[in-house]
Image: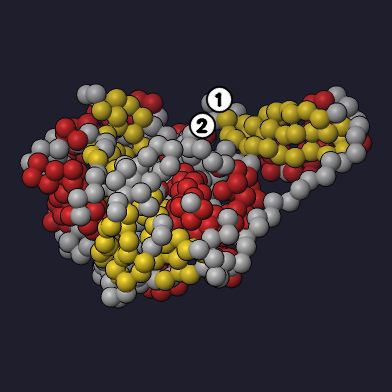
Amino acid sequence: MQKNIQLSLSPKQAAQESDYKNYIADYLEIKSDRISYYKIIKKSIDARSHQVKIVVELTVVTDEAVPKVEEFRPEYKHVTNKPEIVIIGAGPAGLFAGLKAVELGYKPIILERGKEIQERRKDIALLSREHIVNPESNYCFGEGGAGTFSDGKLFTRSKKRGSVKKILEVLKYHGADEKILVEAHPHIGTNKLPDIIKNIRQTILNSGGEIHFDTKMTDFTIKNDKIQSIVTNKGDKIDVQAIILATGHSARDIYYLLDKKGIELEEKSFAMGVRVEHPQDLIDSIQYHCDIRSEYLPAASYSLVNQINNRGVYSFCMCPGGFIVPSATEADQVVVNGMSPSNRNSKFANSGMVVEIRPEDINGFEEYGKLAGLKFQEHLEKMAFLNGGSGQTAPAQRLHDFVNGRLSGILPETSYHPGIASSPLHFWLPEHIGPRLQQGFKNFGKKMYGYLTNEAVVIGVESRTSSPVRIPRDKEKLHHPQIKNLFPCGEGAGFAGGIVSSAVDGELCAEKATYLHKK
């Protein structure tokens, strides 16, 4: 007999997986030797009461032979001389589009403006230590995209067609820990994700695909409602049959190029705000109702949301046991983001805290038309640069001071390596952002007693949560309404938000792009 059950275990019990058979037997009120097979489906933390529990969902087989379990093994074909699909961008959307093309028997040619991972690491080190921003190689651009040096969060609420489970299986196949298949909020960690990305690169290359780094699309020609060829920064002209545009939400030059070519774009809502950083011990004590976190529990996280004056104010990309990092793509910008290693062992917890921004909220940038949101993003990033002191030093304020409109005389220790400088963010943040954040933090302090404290610091600005621009596409065929062989894809096109949903979208676009070759 096969059935699904749910166990509620203490953190210590949940950590002792060798004892699970006994827990299952007790739950089913049978002898353990009757259990022929069990598999963990999902693990999640229930911290609603003072006794924190780990909820474990399992499939259990009793009194029957052990079922045959098929190991996931994708079939990547050899595609050296097969029809080509050009993919712009080697982030999650672009890489998974490449893998899917190989599965379907097509040759992906991936063009990535940034560098491969090892060289990209050097540029990121220079950015953190010496505040030198390489516009083409940074936390946003390079192999793996913005997700490579991030927390590697794999949780998604996306209802997009496609298999989230398959994406997780492919990541496991390329080196991710098996636990990502069962955790309710899986993550890989910034220390492990680069090796997985390199393994995906090698799969594509071994199959006969191509990946060209330091190669940026700078122009293209259109004929008969199709992109006929593209031009790169190296002067190469590449003829295309199908092109997947997976450039990410920070590739602003792509939006400007599309606009210049008269290709339809759409404004969309997005969000901007700050990063807030607390001592991890404080977040643990609030969330787990304890003085000291159990060794069997992970660093605690939180998710907060509220409506302030008809706009959402919410936490974004919360990184327990993590670090705040500089994510600017130009020298005169300051942009902050968060990341965590796999064991989440930093003494800090940080999260974006952002305000929903709609197109009608943006004033003073009307001359830029559909690109007004991009210009507003740039404007705020430059304000952060001017208020941050020098280089990538970021403007900061203690949380309680920010809420009460006071300049902070002394700032707390922070994980942000380039450093922080005291600044009145409450004064210079736009009026549709700053006051909403102040009220939001007050409300969150009531939900999480102890959260609103001067032990915490707000650091500006968190501006790259998503793109203010969408590149429209046909709902079923997924190509652009005007350009029949252009497949806008992933976060940069406005159709995904995170590693997994971008990967799913990459697979979907690759499937549709192959139809052009079949006609």
**Residue 25 numbered mark, or none:** none
The crowd level at tag 2 (other Cα within 10 Å; few <14, some 14-19, many 20+) is: some
Mark 1–mark 2 contact, CB under 8 Å?
yes
Residue 112 x/y as whole percent = 38, 65
Disc 1 crowd rating (10 Å Cα; few below 14, some 14-19, many 20+) is few
Residue at 69% from the left image edge and 43% from the top image edge: 15
Left or right, 501 with reference to 399: right
Residue highlighted by disc 2: 289
Asked if residue 159 can be seen in this view, the reply is yes
Would you name the residue on which mark 1 appears? Answer: 49
| Quadrant containing the N terminus in the rendered view | top right
Taking the image as shown, residue 67 lies to the left or right of residue 304, namely: right
- Relative to 230, residue 448 above or below: above
Q: Nearer the viewer, residue 363 or 318?
A: 363
Of tags 1 and 2, which is closer to the observer? 1
- Classify residue 123 by image quadrant: bottom left
Q: Identity of the amino acid at label 1?
A: Ser
Q: Quadrant of residue 115?
A: bottom left
Q: Earlier in the sequence, mark 1 or mark 2?
A: 1
- Vertical side of 124 occupied by 431: above or below: above
Question: In what element is the residue under mark 2?
Answer: loop
